[in-house]
Image: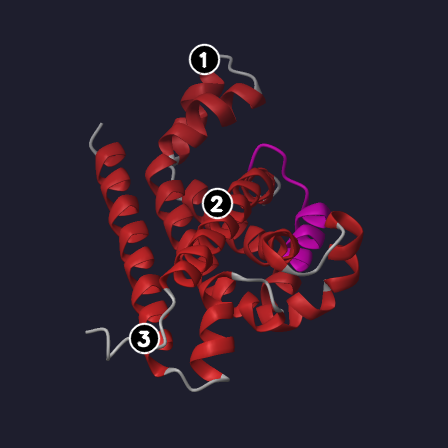
Amino acid sequence: MSALLANVDWSEIAKAAWETLAMLAGSMALTVALGLPLGVLLFLTARGQLLANRAFHGALAVVVNILRSIPFVILLILMMPLTLLLVGTSLGVQGAIPPLVVGAAPFFARLVETALREVQPGVIEAAQAMGARRRDIVLRFLLPEALPGLLAGGTVTAIALVSYTAMAGVVGAGGLGDLAVRFGYQRFQTDVMVVTVILLLILVQALQMTGDRLVAHFSHR
């Protein structure tokens, strides 16, 4: 086994895995913090909803679609000046988080909007009949009813962020993607490439299984 993994430095692997998890955790938290209200706003300002506003909804949808359309590798490069301004560096875990959030938040916002659209209209009508305020309708009726869909969207987003962190390694963001590029690809160390890919697959599988269990749990409350 040691001969097959002769080039693998397990301390480097552990460091890269920790960087990937740090990027995933930090960017996912900020993605939810930004993407959830953005998705709610997209839903509420659509035609026939509580805050229907065609012009505002159209403008917001265009911005979201533009950000979603930019390939992540290009977004990494485009955001370097802004990333430097925000966190003081475009390298490492810190430098990766701003573009990760900008890339993932619009994606998650659309998933949030889709989850809210699946809530039965009668839920809103019942809340209005009870005299609930708009804020209460969103927080106490819409979001709880859409929770399984929101969790499923969060799972999809987290898995997308794993692939984004791997791409971020191309510009020196650290993590398993960076290790795979520097050693597995540039130095032709196939064993390092295989180990990093297996770890990423394990991470994705763990995220999917956790997400599926949460969705199943909250779907049968």
Q: Which residue is mark 3?
A: 194
Q: Quadrant of the C terminus?
A: top left
The location of residue 25, given as percent across then percent down, is 48, 45
Judging from the image, what secondary structure is the residue with disc 1 in?
loop
Q: Quadrant of residue 130 in the image? A: top left
Q: Quadrant of the N terminus?
A: bottom left
Would you place residue 204 above or below residue 172 in this image?
Answer: above
Q: How is the image coloured?
A: secondary structure
- Mark 1 to mark 2 CA distance (whole Å): 39 Å
Q: Which residue is mark 2?
A: 25
Q: Which residue is mark 1?
A: 130
Left or right of 209, for residue 180: right
Instruction: Please report whichever mark, 1 or 2, sits nearer to the chain's N-terminal start.
Output: 2
Amino acid at circle 1? Met
Mark 3, Cα crowd under 10 Å, few <14 / some 14-19 / many 20+, is some
The location of residue 159, given as percent across then percent down, is 40, 57
Left or right of 120, for residue 217: left
- Examine the residues drawn in magenta and state their main secondary structure: helix
